[in-house]
Amino acid sequence: MAKSVSDFVRVASINDIPEGKMKKVVAGSQQVLVVNVKGKYYAIGNVCTHLGGPLDKGILEGHEVECPLHRSHFDVTTGQVKRGPATRPELVYDVKIESGAILVRPKQ
């Protein structure tokens, strides 16, 4: 039986992403940035909406990630742009933890 777009996909283990760290994972054909902020996991698109920079290579400070190319800032909890030049938010993913595994799916 094929998975539907609304299915959660296992992308990592909680041990893979310590508190205050982030990791690029792949869910289907999408690059996703999973972040651990104070023990809670969040997931947004990993490709900057400005010019496609790899957010996982950027800097995480609190709940904001800075793109390494042009310094756009995104809130990892909402996907919203906090500082440009980016103007479009990142796709946000639902995250759930099951038996130590991190699962994501695009927000409905």
Image: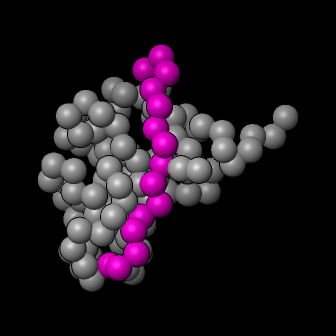
Say left or right for 12 vs 28. left
For residue 72, side relative to residue 12 (left or right): left
Rendering quarter of residue 68: bottom left
Q: Is residue 99 magenta?
A: yes
Question: For residue 82, what is the image quadrant?
Answer: bottom left
Q: Position of residue 52 (x, y in %)?
A: 41, 75
Highlighted magenta segment, given as a residue range: 86-100
Which quarter of the image is occupied by the N terminus?
A: top right
Q: Does the rendering let one see residue 93?
A: yes
Residue 61 in percent (x, y) is at 15, 53
Look at 16% across and 49% down and name the residue there: 62
Residue closest to the far front: 108
Is residue 27 inside the magenta stretch? no
Q: Is residue 92 left or right of residue 4?
A: left
Q: How many marks?
A: 0
- Taking the view exactly as shown, the residue that stands out farthest to the right is 1
Q: Position of residue 92 (x, y in %)?
A: 45, 54
Residue 25 vertical placement versus 103 (above, below) = below
Query: In percent of the image, x 28 and y 58: which residue is there?
Result: 75
Q: Nearer the viewer, residue 17 or 98?
A: 98
- The answer to whether 25 is drawn above or below residue 66 in the figure is above
Which residue corresponds to the image point at 37% horizontal and 28% vertical from the top-left?
Answer: 14
Q: Is residue 24 visible?
A: no
- The spot of residue 37 in percent (x, y) is 23, 40
